[in-house]
Image (spheres, grey):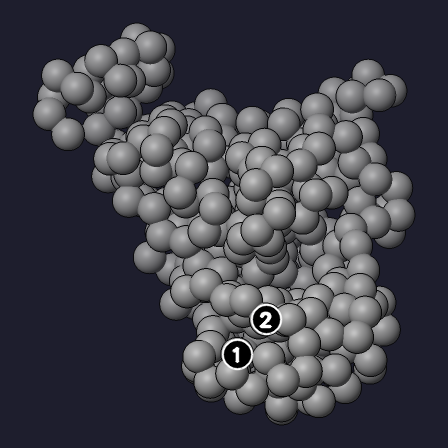
Amino acid sequence: MSTDTMRERYSRQMLFRPIGPTGQERLAQARVAIVGMGALGTILSTQVVRAGVGFVRLIDRDIIEPSNLQRQALYDEIDAKEGLPKSVAAKEKLQRANSDVEIEALATDLTWRNAESLLTDVDVILDGTDNFQTRYLINDVAVKHGIAWSYGGAVSSYGTTAFLRPGITPCLVCLLGPEQGGGTDTCDTVGVIAPIVSIIASLQVAETLKYLTGNAESLANGLTYVDVWSNEFRRIGYPGRNEACPCCGQHQYRALQKQQDALTVSLCGRQTIQVRPDSGRTVSFDGMAHRLRQVGQVRYTEHLLRFEVEDVVMTLFRDGRALIQGTEDPSRARSLYARYIGM
Ligand SMILES: [Zn+2]
């Protein structure tokens, strides 16, 4: 981008003194990865792309559904109708907002196999996930490779966020223990309203901007808890780093070392099971569509193949991963997969 275009586009951000032209230049050189492109992810990505962060990687395993539209601000009714992968639809829209940013869209889930290759060439990892399994994986990669990351979670009307810097702040395991932290509420059971998501995601981006522009002294240095319904806004200062922490003290990366792939995972918010066979194959949609047309309705694009059969809709990705919509029973999802796609 020419200096003039840059000056104009980012003029208000550069007028903000702590950022200024130097901070803007740093943002242009910066790289972030966003894990999860749901409610948090759509806001995280919109703000970092518009702010001019040079490289943004979007990672999400899901497709867009009508129930997402209430809070997932980047998507619209056409996306939901087409059932596009979230990362792909998001990239298209974000690129229109800022064509200077390099955006990479990955329709995949983060696992111990790919986490280190997808998260270690960035300056900050932004958590837009809805589960602690993935957060512990992010924490392992962040601590092992010394990468800052922003933890964020929101359900119901409340949320928590913390900006974690390996070696400086506690890590997620220090804060929440080695097992699943947080409560048992999920957006499945107690729902979620859009305002809390916007606030948590905005706090995550504010911390990220401070960090990337060389303003680390302004970081919150603690967990922030907000409840927009009971009008609470609390800062909980970090405890001292725990040298006995299995992760950042003892360097045991349990989530990474577990090397376990759950064959099935039920996705938050709806009757959908993800099936991920451990085959590492690439699916040919042409061949698959030809075969499946004998038994059900099929359509496919370059990203996914959609197959309607019995009372379910199966969405197949090129890596063999599938989302089975219309069931909450993992064993039924597995058997449908085996029957129609083949293990
Ligand atoms: Zn720790």
Tell me, for residue 97, which label it has, or none: none
Identified by mark 1, the residue type is: Ala
Dot 2 beta carbon under 8 Å from ligand 1: no
Q: Which quarter of the rendering shows the N terminus?
A: top left
Question: At 68% from the left edge and 63% from the top edge, which residue is drawn?
Answer: 133
Return the residue at label 2.
298
Which residue matches tag 1? Answer: 289
Residue 114 in the image, given as x and y percentages of width and height: 46, 71
> Which amino acid, mark 2?
Val
Q: Earlier in the sequence, mark 1 or mark 2?
A: 1
For the point 46% across and 77% down, the residue is 285
Few, some or many C-alpha atoms within 10 Å of disc 2 (few <14, some 14-19, many ≥20)?
many
Where's residue 300, x and y in %? 50, 66
Categorize mark 1 by other alpha carbons within 10 Å: few (<14), some (14-19), many (20+). Answer: some
Helix, strand or loop under label 1:
helix
User: Left or right: where does residue 79 sit relative to residue 6?
Assistant: right
Secondary structure at badge 2 equals strand
Q: In this view, does 51 lie above or below 131?
A: above
Res 55 seen here: yes
**Placement of the C terminus among the 4 image quadrants:** bottom right
Q: Residue at x 17, y 19 (%)?
A: 5
Residue 316 in the image: x percent, y percent? 57, 71
Q: Nearer the viewer, residue 169 or 304?
A: 304
Quarter holding residue 135: bottom right
Q: Front-most of 140 and 240?
A: 140
Kindly indicate the quadrant of the structure image that contains residue 62: bottom right
- Against 269, residue 339 (above or below) is below
